[in-house]
Amino acid sequence: MVPEKERHLIDLAAEAMSCEVFADDIGYLYSGWCMTALPHRRPPGEREFQPWIRENGRFRLIVEPGYAYSPKFETFQVGIPFGSRAHLILFYLQTEAIRNQSAEVELGPSLGKWLSRMGIPDCGLNYQSVREQCRRLSACHLTIGWLADDGTVGFERANIVNKFMFVPSVGGDGRQGSLWNETVRLSPEFFQSLVAHPVPVAEGLSC
């Protein structure tokens, strides 16, 4: 008999193996993100402005909050990225970079189309959430550390992107209809790590 607590794992594995997966259904993640993750929800209080540290075996990830400028050129601190929107944006950037073998990823030609490609419903609240998480992902800094088989310690520091992902504001009806052809370039360090260690991931388990 299979223990009850393990039965759901077997069910998930069976569902994944029974699905027919096509090339367009495959996304990609840097292997480090498969071993650690961003916070699933907003850290409470001041913790969102403190480093986020996750460790898995010999791998450790530190995500540090960064800074941004206001329209009046005032500096303010930006909290660490979190939640499903941040995970989807990061997944989308990595997948497009691997598929096109390019560090430059197109976000347009319209914000609504971009949201649709990420599977995010096209509505005002989602625009606001995506804008906020893009800003947080753009500002944060990563420190990736690992313990090698020979006992030596290695680490790399990187930004995810080289410049801020600009997401335009929307009108009162929650929509942005004008053309928007923004592109973003992954930082060389992050792109090189992604290309060297990509992990294919099915974009969904539903057949």
Image (spheres, rainbow, N blue to C red):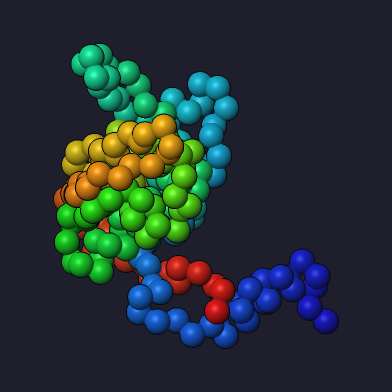
Position above or below: 190 against 138: below
Position above or below: 44 against 133: above
User: For this view, does 132 lie left or right of residue 9?
Assistant: left
Quarter of the image with the N terminus is bottom right
In this view, the residue in front, 116 or 173, is: 173
Q: Quadrant of residue 192?
A: bottom left
In this view, the residue in front, 48 or 59, is: 48
Position above or below: 99 against 160: below
Q: What residue is drawn where x is 46% and y is 53%? A: 120
Whether residue 58 is visible, yes or no, is no
Quarter of the image with the C terminus is bottom right
- x and y, in percent, of residue 80 in the image: 42, 34
User: For this view, does 59 lie left or right of residue 3?
Assistant: left
Q: Quadrant of residue 44?
A: top right
Q: Quadrant of residue 8?
A: bottom right
Whether residue 98 is visible, yes or no, is yes
- x and y, in percent, of residue 4 in the image: 80, 70
Q: What residue is drawn where x is 55% and y is 22%? A: 45
Q: What residue is drawn where x is 56% and y is 74%? A: 206
- x and y, in percent, of residue 96 in the image: 27, 62
Task: Report the label total.
Answer: 0
Q: What residue is drawn where x is 24% and y is 19%? A: 71
In this view, the residue in front, 173 or 66, is: 173
User: For this view, does 18 lie left or right of residue 20?
Assistant: right
